[in-house]
Image (spheres, grey):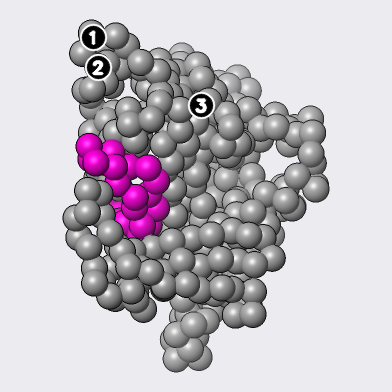
Amino acid sequence: MEKLRQVRRRFEEINHALQDAASLQDSTRYRDLMKEYHSLEPLVQAIQDYENAEAEYQEATQLLEEGDTDADLRQMARQQLTDSRRQMDQTRQQIKLLLLPKDPRDDKNVILELRGGAGGEEAALFAHSLLRMYTMYAAARGWRTELLASSETGLGGIKEASLLVEGAGAYSRLKFESGVHRVQRVPETETQGRVHTSTVTVAVMAEAEEVDLELDPADLRIDTFRSSGAGGQHINKTSSAIRVTHLPTGMVVECQDERSQYKNKDKALKVLRSRLLAQKQAEQKDAIDAARRSQVGTGDRSERIRTYNFPQGRLTDHRVGLTLYRLDSVMDGDLDEIIDALITADQAEKLQTTEE
């Protein structure tokens, strides 16, 4: 309760500050205050809803304790008592969820990397299907996407690709997609109709800004080369493709999608910065608790998280045991039901840990 009182006091302070002329003149401070205001608003509203339900509960209790209350009024009071108790329980649970520590990366943009795994050309074709799925999901939520880098195969598959997703809450919803995605289907190249199993690895990283991680130019080796597409397409006669090597870690990022060397370099550095930040955050997390493994959302790229079975039109997310028989709509970007289930399971696990 003391924490809730602190939240309300802080919300009132921000509300007063937003009406102050000095805040309006300082655009940076005003933006920060508005961001904090919107982050606290749902919790403050939930606190108010709880207090309203509690007041109604006490009013109904008082009516029932009075001996001269008529029968109709007592019946109304009993109903109000039941409704208020239910509202209090629901709002209390909502407040607990809102008080859970928020992942500071949740409001970040996302760099999503896909790599074909076991299965050769079929894995590359499925990687292309997943790239389309995520692009359509982003469009449905009003997010902006930009293909930062891709390496295509001769049949239109993707060996690997990096997709930037920009929009409110992008990381909070896409972070559960990290892992191994397994597909079971008859490949286009299969002549005898046999079902093959292939895999694609997906990595989801919060986009790192320069303030999050500064790159030392002395740690970078930047090479240029001529870009070329699958089957010799899009051959560029100038050396506009960029390869950036981070010498301390040996991490390599290539980008050749743009005809401008400068744009390719900018995209490659964006991917490298995000990879390094993700690596740093993973190391910090392991150091804090190497033994702890969350029920969902571990981000372990070696973990098989989902199976897409095309012959049966079935999708199964193995982390929460969710099975859907509408694979076509999922591949067209209808992912909300899956992501909502993962978020709910993650919140339940965190609540249990907090209460323990």
Which residue was labeled with disc 3? 305
| Mark toward the start of the polypeptide (1 vs 3) | 1
Label 1 amino acid? Gly
Q: Is residue 267 left or right of residue 311?
A: right
Q: Is the C-beta separation of discs 1 and 3 under 8 Å? A: no
Between 186 and 322, the residue placed more toward the observer is 186
Amino acid type at mark 2: Glu
Name the amino acid type tagged 3. Ile
Category of crowding for the residue at label 1, using alpha-carbon neighbours closer than 10 angstroms: few (below 14), some (14–19), many (at least 20): few
- The one nearer the camera, 185 or 167, is 185
In the rendered view of the protein, which quadrant contains the C terminus? top right
Q: Secondary structure at mark 3?
A: strand
The answer to which of marks 3 and 2 sits earlier in the sequence is 2
Please say whether residue 213 is one of the residues in the magenta stretch: no
Counting other residues with Cα less than 10 Å from the Cα at mark 3, is it few (<14), some (14-19), or many (20 or more)?
many
Residue drawn 60% across the image and 66% down it: 246
Image point (30%, 46%), residue name: 152
Q: CA distance from mark 1 to mark 2?
A: 6 Å
Secondary structure of the residue carrying tag 1 is: loop
Residue 141 in the image, given as x and y percentages of width and height: 29, 47
Is the magenta region chiefly helix, strand or loop?
strand
Identity of the residue drawn at 61% across and 70% down: 213
Q: Does residue 35 lie above or below 286 as drawn?
A: below
Residue 81 shows in the view: no
Residue labelled with disc 2: 190
Element type where label 2 sits in the image: loop
**Disc sitting over residue 193 in the figure:** 1
Q: Nearer the viewer, mark 3 or mark 2?
A: 2
